[in-house]
Each structure stands twice: as C-alpha cells, then as structure tokens.
Amino acid sequence: MRLRIAADQVDVWRASLAALPDRQAVLSPDELDRAARFRFEQDSRHFVAGRGWLRTVLARYLDTPPADLRFDYGAHGKPVLSKGCDLRFNLSHSHDLALLAVTKKRELGIDVEFIKESIVGPEIAECFFSAAEIAELRALPREQQRAAFFAGWTRKESYIKGTGAGLFGPLDRFTVSLAPDESRVSLRVHDDEREAARWTLCSLHLGAGYAGALAVEGSDWRLRCFNWPQKLRNLGRPI
Amino acid sequence: YMLPSSFVALDQMPLTPNGKLDRKALPAPDQLLSDSAPVAPRTPLERQVAAIFAKVLKIDQVGIRDNFFDLGGHSFLVLRVLAEIEKACGRRLSVATLFQAPTVEEIGQILAAGDSLDESDVIVPLNPHGTTPPLFSVWMGIATMLREFCGHLGAEETLYGISSHWDPMQRRMTRIEEMAAYNLTHLRKVQPHGPYYLSSDCVATLIVLEMAQQLLAQGEQVAALVLIDPPPPRTYMKTPTAADRYRKLVERHSRSLANLNVIEQITSVLMRVLYFSGSKIALRICMACRLPLPRPLLWRYIRDTHQRAKNNYVPRAYAGKIWFIWAAGDMDEVRRREIQNAWSRLAAQATHRMVPGVHIELFNEPRVGALAEQMRTCLAEARTAPHTSTGVQDDAAGSRHAVATS
C-alpha cells in the first residue's frame, strides 16, 4: 500500500532497532561495504537494520522496490535521494530507537539521543555550546541539567543535520532554548536573522530515557507520528 | 545474506572419534568482524588517546589504526572524545580534525606536533607595540625569519607575522582557500575587524591574496595588500604550452649542468631522474602503508601539496588596491612588464614600486633596509587613503586590536 504525504506534512516514523528485520538484501554495495567496516557486530547490525528500514519506508512513499533506491551524499555526508525526487528525509538512531522523518521539498533534520546517566552534560556543553546556552544550562538546578543538556544537544543536532552542515559547522554560532518541556523551541542564529526565521524546531517526546528533536524548513507544516510496523495510526504526538 | 559474520582460523579441524566434525570443540567466533589484530599504542600520548576512545566507545581495546567511526563512533561521541582530549591534554581539537584524523595514531601525531608547533605559533608578534594599525605579514615558513625586516621597519610599525609553515600531514589542508581561512581564524583573534593591512613574501602570495578576498567577501575592509615580488597570476597570463614548459624545465636543469663534462652530465641527469621518481614511489608506499614520513619525503610531500594547491587555485579579480614591490635585479624589462600588466589586470588598482637586489636577497641584509623603507611608504599611503577613514580612527595600539601575549 502506497504511503501518501501532502505538501505541508512531515511524517516521523519510530522503530525499535532490535525488532527490525535483517534486510541486507536490499542494501547497495557501498552500504554493505560500510557495514563490513564496523569492528563490532552490533554496530554493523544496527547500521544494516537502520538502512534496510530507511529503504523499506521510503520505498512505500515512492512506490518502488527498496533495493532500487539510490542515495547521493551532500558535501558533509548528508544522505539524500537522487536528484529529481521531491521527497526529503533524515534518519537518526541511538541505543535501540530509530527515527525517520519524511517530507516533501523541505529540508529537515531529526535527532534522537539515548540519555546516558554517566554523561556530565555541562562539561561537554562548556566546550561546544554557545555562550547563551552555557549560561542557561548553568542557571538550572543540578538535577535538571542532564535533561536540559540532551534537549539542547538533540535540537542543535537536528538543526545542523537539517542544514546539512553537520558537525563541520560551528556549534557555538547558534543558540537553541534548552527547557525540555517547551512546545516551541526557539532558534537564534548569530549574525543571521533570516536563517533562523527559515526553520522551525520542535521537541519530540519519546518516553523515558530518550531525547529527540526535529528541525524543518518553514513554519506551515503539520506533524504526524507513527510507530513502525503498526498500521498507519496516529500513535504518538510531539508537543 | 548468508555470508558468515566472522572467520576464525584453525590449524586443524577438531574431529570426533568417528572422524566427523566435532562442533562442540569449535572455538566460538569472537565479537570482532575484522580479523586484523588491533595495534597497541606505542607512546604515552597514544595510550592516553586510546584510553579516551575506549572509554567513550565503551570497548576494551582500541588499536591505533582503528577508525573511530568504524568502532561505532558517531556525532555525539565525537564531542565527548574532543571534550575528554581537551581535559587530558589541554588542546581543543576541532570536529573537522577528528573527521580527517579518526585514528589514535593520527590524533597522537597532531597532539605531539602541537608541542613544538602550537596553534598559537601561527601568529608571531614581531612588534606588537607599534603606534600604527597592525600589518600582518604572511611568511611561508616560521615568521621569526621576519625579525630583520621588522627591525628595519621601525618601532612605530606594528607587525605580526603569520607562519604559514603548515604541514599537510597535520593540518590536512590541500587548498589555498583552506590555508587562507586557517590563517584568518588566527589573525582575527588579534584583530577581529578591519581595516586590515596584509602583506606576504613571494611564496605565500596566493595565500595572502585569497585571505584578502575572503575578508572582502565577509564585508571587512582591506586597507592595504602589499605583495613583495610575487609570481605572475597564472590565469592572467597566457597559458604556457607544453613546449614552453618543457623548455623551462630544460633551462632550469641545464644551468646547473653547464660546467660538467658529458659523463658527469649524464650521471647527474640519471641521478635526478632516479631521485625524482624514486622519492615519488617511496612517498606513495609510505602513504599507503601509513608509515611516518622521513624528513626528505616529508619535504617532498609538502612541496608537492603546495604545488598542487597553487596549480588548483584560480586567482580572481581583486576589488581593491594592491601595492607591488619588485626586485629590480632579477629579470629583464620585457618579462617584468608582462607580469606587472597581468597583475594590473587582476587588481582594481595597482601601484608598482622597485627595490634594488635580486629576489632571494630581499629579506636579508643589506637589501632588507630598502624593502622596509618601501613598505613604510606603501603603508603610509594606505593609511591616508580615503576609505580607511570610516569615522573610527585607528589610534594607538591596544585600542583596535587585542594584543597577543608574547
């Protein structure tokens, strides 16, 4: 059954990596090559599962066999569908959770991160976050800092994945708000107001143990969230 | 999809008393997919970095040639590794560094080189206490070579050298644009905003030209760009034909062969050919096997990368004024006119000056005095030109730029 998506829709699919079938057969030679380079079987398995799933889902939108999809890679490695295709997507996985965001003709980025108890958020923030973010983080009570750090991190990641710059761009030249529960995340790009106005960022509520965020071009879009492989039913909604 | 996920080498197959394969006696395939043993760290620095990798990736053993991303590293862990390295060694490496040097061995090299070649060595405060806005002079090598020049320039002229002695093995820069951007990040720590005064020795011409272009593109003012005996801008001269290039090559070599007899000439040519091709092969082998390069090969690699970078760079029209200081002694009038005209076509405005002497002696005694004099003239002209007075006067040193600690 073909999946349809309207021009103002953003679909976010969620899957458990462990539950995804092994679909090595649909991967391209370079993907298989990448899978082979991992030192540890688990990383390789996650990679294969993630890519197989990506192909499976996109194939449903495009009504093509999953193995026929061809990907190109942007200047900093962001995967995109070959030229001429309207569909845009971004994939992220951490620990056991994989998220796939799909839309038409809008750039987007998605990030999910498993909240590790051992991380000292502020330490990493000090090195990489913007001054305003560091200040906001420090002002929070200690027990809220970890959640705020991961909220901030996933939002920043989703934005830089959206723009395609990835970690090559300077992380401290833009600021996101860090409060975990807010509905609308604010983005401020130093030296470039128009850039910030181009994007809408939102938090994704994924349940305990995970932080997630989505960045999409434009502000006139609606979000639908689905669990894979359940029937197409609205099962989760971000706030 | 039926490929086995790991292979285990056995000397012989364990057999049951019946002669059948004894499955229970087979060793369990271990976790690793790759069958190459990890190479252990060899120095304290490598041990430190390997320990950081192991801690962040949550694995037991990290070989120095294992790729961080093949070990399961991803974006978030990149930041963790960099943060840990900063904590342990005090050096903050960039994300791009880790992407370009994703192994313990390479990071170890970068960190080790850092001790003798600190990031802050890029900017050499030759005279930070002058009364003029600072001149940044790019030098292909260690900018302390500019000390004599600095002395002759006088105490009033603020001068910072930019050491563009980048080593492609560490910095991994292969394009002029990257080198220029790299120099600019350091330059801007000393002077965050224009107007800028830039100059360079002849070898770094393209780099300083690109630096000026990038500054202009970023909306900054470049009050002066002073080029000292620069080579001709390739795209503004007629392209040499293959015959021309061959002729130049022969000329270059025949000068040094002129005084030898025939036997010596042949031997000399053979030796050069052997050395040239031999070193190229040796370089390829070392790079392929990731061996550390011995000094002569390192220089060869640096020179080749420089040359390729210069060949790949396309000088664009420059929207400002360039001052040229030429060495009078070097070449014939016709050739010099040709080069000057080429540069005049590239720059929106150009002024050509001369100093006595030949190219290679310009920065040494006794010629350096004249060079410094000419530089002072050019800078004075640039300072009194209309576009530098933007309402904010550049006054005594310290107010318009942060003074780098020496």
Image (cartoon, rainbow, N blue to C red):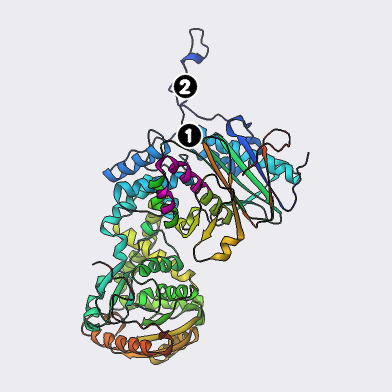
Asked if the residues shown at circle 1 and circle 2 are in contact, with their CB atoms under 8 angstroms apart, the answer is: no
The residue sitting at the bottom extreme is: B333
Give the labeled residue for mark 2: B28
User: In terms of depth relative to the viewer, which is nearer, A102 or A10?
Assistant: A10
- Which is nearer the eye, B62 or B161? B161
Q: Residues within 10 Å of mark 1 (few under 14, many from 20)?
A: some
Whether A136 is among the magenta residues is yes
Q: Amino acid at mark 2?
A: Ala
Q: Residues within 10 Å of mark 2 (few under 14, many from 20)?
A: few
Magenta residue span:
A135-154
Distance in Å between CA atoms under marks 1 and 2:
15 Å
Relative height, residue A174 to residue B385 (above, below): above
Q: Where A116 falls versus B208 (above or below)?
A: above
Q: Give yes or no for residue B231 being in the magenta stretch.
A: no
**Chain of residue at mark 1:** A
Q: How many marks?
A: 2
> Based on the displayed image, in which of its 4 quarters is residue B126 positioned?
bottom left
Label 2, secondary structure: give it: loop
Disc 1 secondary structure class? loop
Which residue does the image show at 58% across and 65% down from the upper left?
A194
Instruction: Find residue A121 and report its image quarter.
Output: top left
Residue B290 left/right relative to B374: right
Confirm whether residue B44 shows in the render.
yes
Tell me the number on the disc at residue A40: 1
Nearer to us of marks 1 and 2 is: 1
Q: Chain of mark 2?
A: B
Q: Residue visible at 40% across and 46% down? A: A122
Task: Identify the amino acid type marked 1.
Answer: Phe
Q: Quadrant of the C terminus of chain A?
A: top right
Give residue B250's position: percent from left, percent from top.
40, 76
Residue B102 visible here: no
